Amino acid sequence: MSKIKRICVYCGSGPGADPAFVAAARAFGAILADNRIGLVYGGGSVGLMGEIANATLNRGGEAIGIIPAFLKNREIANLRGEMIVTSDMHERKRRMFDEADAFVALPGGVGTLEEVVEQMTWAQLGRHRKPILLANIAKFWDPLCALLDHMQELQFIRAGLSVNYLVADRVEDVLPILSRAIESVAEQDKAMNPPIAGRV
């Protein structure tokens, strides 16, 4: 049975307009630290990225930031915790995948959307079985869930190519949901071997 050692959290490099977003990032960072689960994140020190990383580190947890060199100044790379600098976005996303056992998307912008949808696509195509969860804080992800339902109704998401994802409305529910989901995932199903990775 698989266990979750680290979670990759996709989230915004800004705080968003609703204070609930920052509160959720801080709360989830503390939850990760208290449960001895490492954080893998985008490496920035601003926005929700900075909030969750600092909350994790402030409670004695592990935070691994992964950032491409060209974003170190723009997203103000966090000087706390471990930092991995990559050559480009593709390497960043692959390293985030390799370091994590599951994926959680907090509120964010186009980059956050692209990252979590890419994981959905990889899973849809059978490249991995790591759980993917939308942290639907203040109903932020409702439009995406509605769009995915719409795609399925119109048969652009066809039988046998379902998009499997989980949803939690509160960060307190994230770990219990992920822990149940990971139980059915064998260790070998969490990794992409090099030949497969080269084809995604």
Image (tube, rainbow, N blue to C red):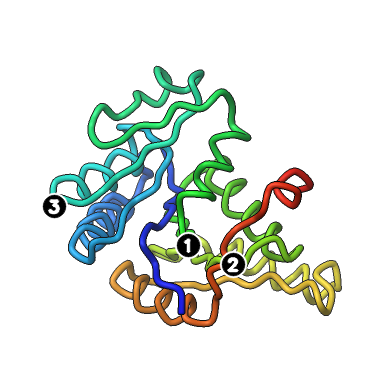
Measured Cα–Cα span from mark 2 to mark 1: 14 Å
Judge whether 117 appears above or below 142 on screen. above
Q: Position of residue 135 (x, y in %)?
A: 43, 64
Q: Position of residue 108 (x, y in %)?
A: 47, 46
174 to the left or right of 188: left
The numbered mark, 3 or 1, whose residue comes first in the sequence reads 3
Q: Residue at x 31, y 54 (%)?
A: 38
Q: Position of residue 159 (x, y in %)?
A: 83, 79
Q: Nearer the viewer, residue 193 or 7?
A: 193
Measured Cα–Cα span from mark 3 to mark 2: 32 Å
The numbered mark, 3 or 2, whose residue comes first in the sequence reads 3
Q: Which residue is label 1 attached to?
A: 102
Judge whether 150 appears above or below 199 on screen. below
Q: Residue at x 48, y 75 (%)?
A: 182
Q: Residue at x 65, y 51 (%)?
A: 118
Mark number for residue 59? Answer: 3
Q: Nearer the viewer, residue 44 or 197?
A: 197
Provide the secondary structure element on which disc 3 rests.
loop
Q: Which residue is label 2 attached to?
A: 188
